[in-house]
């Protein structure tokens, strides 16, 4: 897979630092995406079914809802990256993650179905970024009134996944 350097702080909004800092600065972000999916899948499949519906506090998402949120977020950030890579000049909308989670139907879905979708989205993500021209990673655009580079969106979605997997380990499994 190709090397994609880590974005500079001026390539993304300040809130994204919490995700981007979770990733190594080795340029192997696409390899990390593939490996992180496999690690997440292994973790999730090791859990009893009832744990997938556990909420560590009122109004917090279940593990199934978190997984579908990761998928939704990845689709949205990849769409933004594709738009910017292709030269889109229009501002793209934001999204309300709690509305998406509430309307996802995640808790009624079979975990294997969720993981199948997760894997399909991840493979598609890697294929898109592997196929972009080198100069596409420097292109920028505005979504949700915030400027990002294509490279920053890639690192954001990988760090966002790690953030949530870490939360699952810390808040859902230490009981």
Image (cartoon, rainbow, N blue to C red):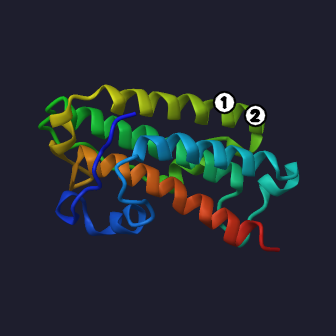
Q: Secondary structure at mark 2?
A: helix
The residue at 34%/49% (across/down) is 27
State the mark number for residue 116: 1
The residue at 77%/67% (across/down) is 173
Q: Secondary structure at mark 1?
A: helix
Q: Determine whether label 2 and label 1 are within 8 Å by CB.
A: yes
In this orientation, which residue lies closer to the viewer: 109 or 126?
126
The residue at 66%/30% (across/down) is 116
Q: CA distance from mark 2 to mark 1?
A: 6 Å
Left-right relation of 45 to 144: right
Q: Position of residue 141 (x, y in %)?
A: 17, 45
User: In the displayed structure, would residue 81 be above or below residue 174?
Assistant: above
**Residue 58 appearing in the image:** no
Q: Quadrant of the C terminus?
A: bottom right
In this orientation, which residue lies closer to the viewer: 167 or 143?
167
Q: Position of residue 18 (x, y in %)?
A: 40, 69
Rendered image quadrant of residue 86: top left
The residue at 35%/46% (across/down) is 154
Left-right relation of 139 to 107: left
Q: Residues within 10 Å of mark 1 (few under 14, many from 20)?
A: few
Q: Quadrant of the N terminus?
A: top left
- Residue beneath label 2, please? 112
In this orientation, which residue lies closer to the viewer: 86 or 96?
86
**Residue 121 appearing in the image:** yes
Left-right relation of 37 to 92: right
């Amino acid at each position: 897979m190709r090397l994609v350097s880590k974005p500079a702080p001026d390539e993304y909004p300040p809130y994204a630092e919490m995700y981007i800092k979770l990733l190594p600065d080795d340029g192997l972000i696409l390899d990390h995406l593939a490996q992180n999916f496999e690690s997440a899948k292994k973790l999730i499949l090791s859990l009893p079914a009832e744990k997938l519906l556990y909420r560590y506090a009122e109004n917090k998402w279940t593990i199934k809802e978190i997984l579908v949120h990761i998928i939704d977020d990845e689709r949205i950030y990849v769409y933004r990256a594709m738009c910017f890579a292709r030269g889109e000049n229009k501002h793209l909308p934001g999204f309300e993650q709690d509305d998406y989670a509430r309307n996802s139907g995640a808790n009624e879905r079979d975990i294997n179905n969720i993981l199948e979708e997760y894997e399909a989205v991840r493979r598609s993500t890697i294929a898109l970024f592997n196929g972009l021209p080198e100069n596409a990673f420097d292109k920028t655009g505005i979504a949700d009134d915030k400027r990002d580079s294509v490279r920053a969106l890639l690192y954001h979605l990988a760090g966002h996944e790690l953030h949530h997997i870490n939360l699952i380990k810390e808040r859902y499994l230490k009981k």
